[in-house]
Image: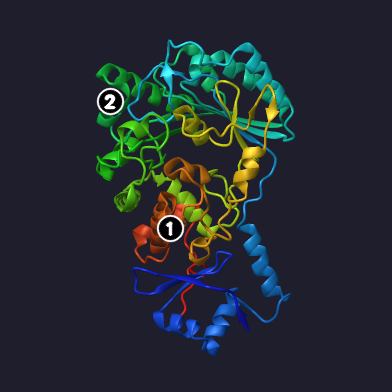
Amino acid sequence: MDVMPLKFRPTPSGRFLFCDDAGGFFEAPQEFLERYAEGRLTGDDERFLESNGHGFGRPGDLRFQAFGYRWARRLHVPTQLDYVILVPTLRCNLACSYCQVSRVNESTPGHDWDRRTLQAVIHWLDGLHTEKIKIEFQGGEPLLRLDVLQEIREFARQRFATAEFVVCTNLQDVNEGAWEFLSSVDTFISTSLDPTVALHKRNRTGTEGLTARFLANLDKAQDLCPGRVSALPTFDPDALPDPEAVVATYASHGLQSLFLRPVNHQGFARKRFRTRDVGSAWNDYVRRFIFALIEHNAASSTPMEEFYFSHCLRRVLLSGHDGHVDLRNPNTLGTSYLVVDHDGSFYPTDEARMMGRLGQIDLRMGNVHEGFDPAIAKAMNAESLNTFDADCIHCPYQAFCGIDLIDDLSRYGRIDMPRHETDFCKRHLGIFDLVFELIYSEDEKVRKSVALWAGLERLEPELLRVHS
């Protein structure tokens, strides 16, 4: 019998986690590792490996074909361009201390789409081949250009068979026309609620009155748009609040999901905060936070999740879970996802446009007036997968992980950093270590939350293979 290459990593239980290239995994003791490494597998070892898809009799048999199918399912296959971020204005009515998009003041001219650019955007959208579209409006504060949002949405509803819209708004000043726009069932709200109300006031609103207005608008949005409101906190890695306080803040406003997001290394944020490498302290905080959520879920009838941890958990348990654009393999640029900036320029990601605003590097890929220029995408996409990376090929988490060239370029000024030295790798090693620790936990509180976050009624024993 031939055995698929296995990668391994020690676990807190004292055993080792083994993974193959297609994402099949199991735990086994050190004695099995020694037998595997020395080429002296027993009959029991071979039967276990073959029955669980890690071995096959000869190339071409059903087990080998099944392995190939599982491996292919782990790869993200770019499809038609069906997700666009539109930035009709950079103007904003707040001046958040860790703004990552490099906004300008609300009264600053020259940072909005003019009529010519709006018509060019509509013409470009009309030329897309997809029949479904997701359009995310960002800024600045996009509600300052409600007229543009209305015109784009009206066009998209007529042009595409299926259309979904997301408005990334600070919810600070929302007039009746904006509430009417946001109330539509095809329109979602993404806002920012910092880890605690005190931190939100300090870093975003600045006064008690503005903070109270935001919180009232957030609660109104929850009532008007049930199930269509998400909120993201931003964390200063040098001043992390107690996880329980953050959970309480979000629960008090009826929010069941949050995204642990350290201050981004783009935009104005990098000038005021430590952003380049958040290191092990951030991983330790994520761990504390996940266990705080587990305790919350054990005692509450309204469970809560951390979005990114749940996403990584599902990537382990479910192949093809590629919805988050920052964690794919390959993570090709300029294909299924594109950004149109306030001046009509195309960018491969939102972070790429922020880097351009800082003058770090110009990653524009043409514009809506002259067309898409694939040169930058072609140059970078040669490195947009982890499949053959010299470091990733030895990592048991390779099949579940991805790559983020824009993040590497932003932090280090290059895309060929040794993978294990990047902030991306360090953070994801911590996340996947925790994912597998919880998957194999026998604590009922843990198992309850893991099942909820994975979208399962319960964790089936067949998922948790262990070999002695």
Q: Considering the image in quadrants, where does the N terminus appear?
A: bottom right
Residue 420: which numbered mark, if any? 1
Label 1 Cα crowd, 10 Å radius (few <14 / some 14-19 / many 20+): some
Does residue 332 appear in this view?
Answer: no
Which is more toward the observer, 218 or 400?
400
Compared with 279, 35 (above or below) is below
Q: Residue at x 59, y 57 (%)?
A: 319
Residue 434, position as x, y percentages in the image:
38, 59
Which residue matches tag 2? 201
Query: Which sits earlier in the primary sequence, circle 1 or circle 2?
Result: 2
Residue 197, position as x, y percentages in the image:
28, 30
Q: Which residue type does callout 1 highlight?
A: His
Q: Considering the image in quadrants, where does the C terminus appear?
A: bottom left
Residue 371, position as x, y percentages in the image:
70, 27
Compared with 117, 72 (above or below) is below
Name the mark nearer the viewer: 1 or 2. Answer: 1
Q: Residue at x 26, y 40 (%)?
A: 245
Would residue 94 be found to the left or right of residue 77 on screen?
Answer: left
Image-quadrant location for residue 386: bottom right
Which is more toward the observer, 394 or 25?
394
